[in-house]
Image (cartoon, rainbow, N blue to C red):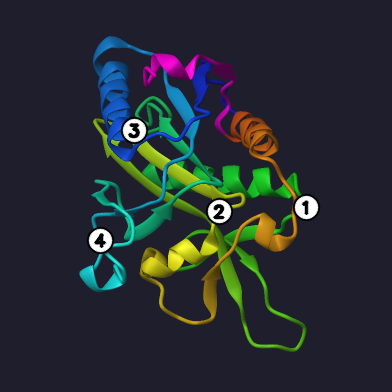
């Protein structure tokens, strides 16, 4: 595994507005490319909201008045963010890390899968369906698979923005206001660590994500103050 330089790692304890997060990502990505700033991985939670990717279909927003809706500027369709969900935004220099978008997305998938394995969750990817999934098919029953983590990224001058969201213990009913990632097939749903019977704190999820990130991306995460990103 190639070793890269250390990466800044911030964890925001208070919910971060989507507008503030977008502003921070844009500014940091610009600084990475133009000023040689350090890469950043940012763990946070958002208040309840829906985001629309560049492929979002209006019909997939079932309850537009329920929560605020934002154009994310990332790839993908509609997704939900809210309390109990660990969002990890990555501002990484993909240009310096091989300029291979497919490999970058595969690393994001591997990162989540390894982190979930720390809680004895057997998760994986599925052909034609973005994100990370778990098999919930009961013995002898019909196929049932549920998404536990979403992936949506954008590259700006080879620096990544956005990232992943892992369902630790969000209110899963909030996903009913959209067609998550445009998948309407009743065989496919949404779950969380709590939904799988795993009692996991956000801090424990963070430690699993941190360890898995360092394994997959070859960089050490070095904690920095989140207040430097979004002043309170």
- Quarter of the image for residue 86 reads top right
**Closest to the observer: 139 or 66?**
66
> Pointer 4 and pointer 1: residues touching (CB < 8 Å)?
no
Instruction: Give how far across and how far down residue 81 sits, in percent.
Output: 43, 50
Alpha carbon of mark 4 to alpha carbon of mark 1: how far? 33 Å
Residue found at x 66% / y 43%:
115
Name the residue beneath numbered marker 2.
Answer: 170
Q: Nearer the viewer, mark 1 or mark 2?
A: 2
Mark linked to residue 21: 3
Name the residue beneath numbered marker 1.
Answer: 120
Alpha carbon of mark 3 to alpha carbon of mark 1: how far? 31 Å
Alpha carbon of mark 3 to alpha carbon of mark 2: how far? 19 Å
> Pointer 3 and pointer 1: residues touching (CB < 8 Å)?
no
Residue found at x 37% / y 21%:
230
Name the residue beneath numbered marker 4.
Answer: 55
Q: Earlier in the sequence, mark 4 or mark 1?
A: 4
**Closest to the observer: 164 or 199?**
199
Residue found at x 55% / y 53%:
170
With respect to residue 148, does 117 lie above or below?
above
Instruction: Give how far across and how far down residue 76 sits, in percent.
Output: 33, 57
Residue found at x 59% / y 35%:
216
């Amino acid at each position: 595994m190639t070793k890269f330089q250390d990466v800044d790692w911030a964890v925001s304890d208070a919910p971060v507005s989507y507008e503030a997060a977008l502003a921070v990502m844009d500014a940091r990505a610009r600084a990475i490319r133009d000023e040689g700033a350090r890469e950043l991985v940012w763990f946070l939670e958002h208040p309840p909201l829906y985001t629309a990717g560049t492929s979002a279909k209006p019909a997939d927003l079932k309850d537009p008045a329920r929560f605020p809706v934002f154009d994310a500027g990332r790839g993908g369709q509609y997704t939900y963010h809210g309390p109990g969900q660990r969002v990890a935004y990555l501002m990484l220099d993909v240009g310096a890390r091989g300029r291979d978008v497919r490999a970058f997305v595969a690393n994001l998938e591997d990162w989540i899968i390894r982190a979930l394995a720390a809680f004895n969750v057997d998760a994986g990817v599925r052909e034609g369906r973005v994100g990370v999934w778990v098999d919930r098919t009961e013995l002898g029953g019909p196929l049932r698979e549920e998404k536990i983590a979403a992936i949506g990224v954008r590259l700006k001058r080879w620096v990544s923005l956005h990232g992943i969201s892992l369902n630790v213990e969000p209110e899963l009913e909030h996903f009913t206001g959209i067609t998550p990632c445009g998948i309407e097939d009743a065989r496919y749903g949404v779950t969380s660590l709590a939904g799988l019977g795993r009692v996991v704190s956000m801090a424990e999820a963070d430690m699993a994500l941190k360890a898995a990130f360092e394994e997959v991306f070859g960089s050490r995460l070095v904690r920095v103050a989140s207040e430097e990103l979004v002043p309170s």
